[in-house]
Amino acid sequence: MLSAATKTAAGVTKGLAENDVKTSAREALHKVEREAKSVMDDVSHYASDAGQKVRHIYDQAVDEVSHVSHNVESEIKSNPVRSSMVALGVGFILGALLTRR
């Protein structure tokens, strides 16, 4: 049989081992939390950059469409007869193409 001193030593060793396991688990959890936060920060940064780039491209497209629209409007006002003839020709061609089916 085991002596009382051996049983006491085994109990102390068990307690120390449990404490070491808990400490290691806490440290691992904190490390995972830090890594997850770092990844989330990186993803947030990349998403913000992508959003800014998309917004810039969108703003450029809006400016270009506005510019083209202004040019077309100016052309129509300065040459209304020619613009009407072009519109009539385009309408005739589209009508002919769509009714051929």
Image (tube, rainbow, N blue to C red):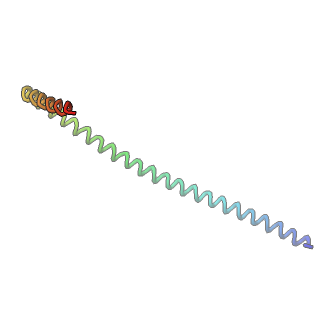
Where is 78 relative to 35, above or below?
Answer: above
Where is 39 relative to 77, above or below?
Answer: below
User: Which quadrant of the structure image shows residue 58?
Assistant: top left
Q: In which quadrant is the C terminus drawn?
A: top left
Percent position of residue 21, x then y = 71, 63
Q: Residue at x 20, y 30 (%)?
A: 99
Residue that extends furthest to the front in the rendered view of this protein:
101
Where is 33 relative to 59, above or below?
Answer: below
Q: Residue at x 70, y 60 (%)?
A: 22
The front one of 92 and 28 is: 92
Q: In which quadrant is the N terminus drawn?
A: bottom right
User: Which quadrant of the structure image shows residue 27?
Assistant: bottom right
Percent position of residue 63, x then y = 24, 38
Q: Residue at x 61, y 57 (%)?
A: 30
5 vs 99, left or right, is right
27 vs 76, left or right, is right
63 vs 48, left or right, is left
Q: Residue at x 83, y 66 (%)?
A: 11
Percent position of residue 38, x then y = 50, 55
